[in-house]
Amino acid sequence: MQPRVGMTQNHQNLSSSPPPRPSPKAWTFAEQALAEQEANHRRRELRSLTPIDTLHICRDGQTLLNFSANDYLGLSKHPQVIARAVDYTQRYGTSATASRLVAGAFTIHEQLETQLASSLGHEATLLFGTGFQANSTVIPALVRNDAKQTLILCDRLVHNSLVKGILASGARFIRFPHNDMVALEQQLQKASGKYQRLMVISETVFSMDGDRADVEALIALANQFGAFLYLDDAHALGVLGPDGMGLAAQRPGVDLLVGTFGKSCGAAGAFVACSAQLRDYLVNFCAGVIYTTALPPGTVGAVSAALDLIPAMAAERQHLATEAQWLRHQLEVLGYGTGGSMSQIVPAIIGSEAETLALASHLETQGYLATAIRPPTVPANTARIRFALSCHHQREHLVGLVAAIASPASAGILQSP
């Protein structure tokens, strides 16, 4: 075969040769890092499972009662949610096929955004692929060219996606002690007049402790000091607030809220709610909007159906709150800290990574899926089992779980809590 015009024989031979294999030394970083994770009882692994129904999964041939999913209202298996996902897929296809700025701005995306804005009491909303994508790209877009003139004050326990967004923004930031409004006020006073822009970032329900932020106090402080208030409402949406629409819903003092669809809505994706002007700004400057394919039609349909159902699920929300309170009390009787939980997220804080893994393994043998959460996801020495309740969990499920939690201590699996 003759080389193409402009291509030397030497070039042709190089292009057909396999690339050289990297030196084994090039991969020692991975080996060393994984060995360190293993030694510290922090190595993660992906373990496959098969969902059975709203509460049960199958893993390695064993049926387990699931206490680790965020499907708080059981909507991922709701017939109406599934039916609309199927309907939208059949009508509009399996993919939006492009960024919304190219060819992916379907009418159904706009309809969902309008539905969301009305339910949340905000002027506008904007869809994102995931909550992580939203937080990690919206914050840099908000700061953009003003990094040196911006100070971000964030709660010490905010989600990793928020931390990633803050770091990517290049702005100076300070973590104030968890839910400490006095400390936040002091930091705002120190910063007043020194920066052109102040931003306060918090979650409303904290994903690992299940406790709540004082949203009223955050709004008051943001107003007092002219700060931009950014709240992640992911774990409150569907469960708390007016009509279950979250703790940041119907709050004029919240400049931007983030919510996700992969929890109470039983679907996937995320959104921000804000002013119409800020939405337009994000469409122009947020990489998480500009450079990604829009949500698939089936997901849009599922979320739309979930939003129709959530306001009428007050009884399910009350049941969830009652059972979470009962579980907190039982764990505290056993001697476990529950992290100030005031929601459907109830941690049993153990401390030691090794003992937390041992408890999770024991619970699995007893028929319960309850995943161990370890640093750096949570602070050092606060490894825990994070129980995420569903409105489909009944008291008998919790009674069995508590009995299984109580048994390892006497068997010597755990030290006393």
Image: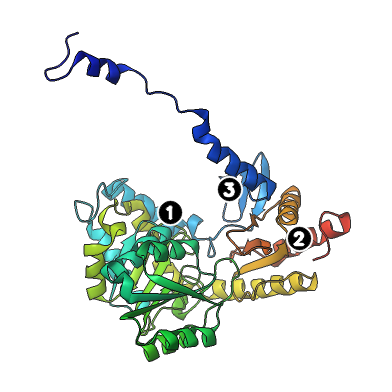
Q: Residue 344: x and y, percent?
A: 59, 70
Would residue 305 be seen by someone viewing this image from the given angle?
Answer: no
Which of the pair 101/2 is nearer the observer? Answer: 2
**Kind of residue at disc 3:** Ile
For the residues labelled 1 and 3, say whether their Cβ atoms are less than 8 Å apart.
no
Q: Could you say whether the residue bearing mark 3 is in a helix, strand or loop?
A: loop
Mark carried by residue 400: 2
Q: Which residue is mark 3?
A: 52
How many angstroms separate mark 2 from mark 3 (CA)?
20 Å
Residue 11 at x, y percent in the picture: 23, 19
Q: Classify residue 192 by image quadrant.
A: bottom left
* Rendered location of residue 68, percent (x, y): 61, 57
Specify the farthest residue to the top.
Answer: 1
Q: Name the one closer to the observer, 288 or 406.
A: 288
**Residue receiving disc 1:** 82
Label 2 secondary element = helix
